[in-house]
Image (cartoon, rainbow, N blue to C red):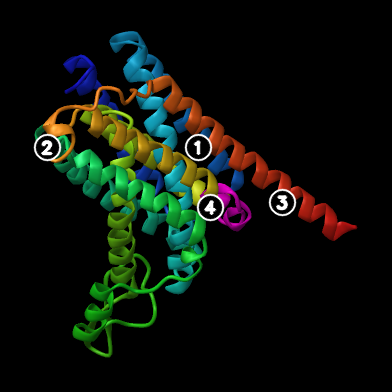
Amino acid sequence: MAETPLAFEIITFVVLALFFIVDLFVIGRRPHVPSTKECVQHIAFFVVMALIFGGCIWFFAGSKPAIEFYSGWLTEYSLSIDNLFVFVIIMSNFAVPKQLQKYVLSVGITIALIFRGIFILIGAALISRFTWVFFIFGAFLIYTAVKLVIGGDDDEEYHENGLIRTLRKVIKITDDYDGEKLRTTRNGVRYWTPMLIVFLTIGTTDVMFAFDSIPAIFGLTKDPFLVFTSNVFALLGLQQLYFLLGALLDKLVYLPAGLSVVLGFIGVKLVMEALHGNTLPFINGGHGVHWVPEVPTWLSLAVIVVAIGGASIASVIKMKTLESGKKA
């Protein structure tokens, strides 16, 4: 159920649509490698916009939904940064020219937004009808948190999924790119370019990412509007972040640990909420387990800030220590 006024939501969707059109289809369509200054300016702009948007929510709807938005946005943004590891590997594997990578990311982010919107609608419908789905969401997030800790090297190598492997067998694909074109002609024969495979890879990979991010955000707020806007603000500026952090991603060594703390915390929070509103007959006779405490929204935000901030600071300290050790 939405906690914000309808007029505010309509205006928000219009403004966000304009942001996306300009960011992805005006700026993003100009093939070039953005400078560090350009990246920093874009990222700073969207971060400030997210902070202002949270302040507007606070003004129009109160502190609780505002804190939920900030918590969701920080979580989704952190997950997006972690996902950039895979995007870097995909771009490298398919040898995407540097000047085309911005365009590829623009299309990939658009695909991501569509898929996440669908997942959010499905998630909201499930939660409103079946509260026990929190048990599944919570267990999955806890599993993901553990996997991040013990399987932190999963992203070091990208493996094509079955869809991409099958596609390569049934259609003609060239080895070389032809600008932004999906189709090209060689010796009078029509071929698909590798751009098609790259788009499909980015899109299907983000579907897998959504299985982590959507349950995580629903663990912080049940308002579909806040869930969606948290995702949108996390995706805005992501392509600039890709170029800014591309060379530094492998140095954020403690980010997976910070994310595992966040996902584990939200997973436990979801299980606690599921127990509190329990309707499953084999648990406490189908009644809620009311001795289970409710986690306040401010505590969720505090855990996210401390975990992600601490992991980032620790990564920077280790990076500087290693660099000073090499100089010595």
State the residue position of label 2: 130
**Residue at the spot 56% in from the left edge and 39% down from the top edge:** 40
Could you tell me the amino acid type at mark 2?
A: Phe
Horizontal side, residue 303 vs residue 214: left or right: right
- Which of the two discs, 3 and 4, labels the residue nearer the N terminus? 4
**Residue at the spot 32% in from the left edge and 82% down from the top edge:** 174
Which segment is the magenta one?
245-256
- Which of the two discs, 2 and 3, labels the residue nearer the N terminus? 2
State the residue position of label 4: 243
Is residue 305 in view from this perspective?
yes
Are dots 1 and 3 in contact, CB under 8 Å? no
Could you tell me the amino acid type at mark 3?
A: Met
Mark 1 to mark 2: distance in Å?
A: 38 Å
Question: On screen, 107 above or below 16?
Answer: below
Are dots 2 and 3 in contact, CB under 8 Å? no
Q: Nearer the viewer, mark 2 or mark 3?
A: 2
On residue 319, the disc is 3
- Which of the two discs, 1 and 2, labels the residue nearer the N terminus? 1
- Which of the two discs, 1 and 4, labels the residue nearer the N terminus? 1
Are dots 4 and 2 in contact, CB under 8 Å? no
Give the image location of residue 143, x and y in percent: 37, 52
Q: Nearer the viewer, mark 4 or mark 2?
A: 2
Could you tell me the amino acid type at mark 1?
A: Ile
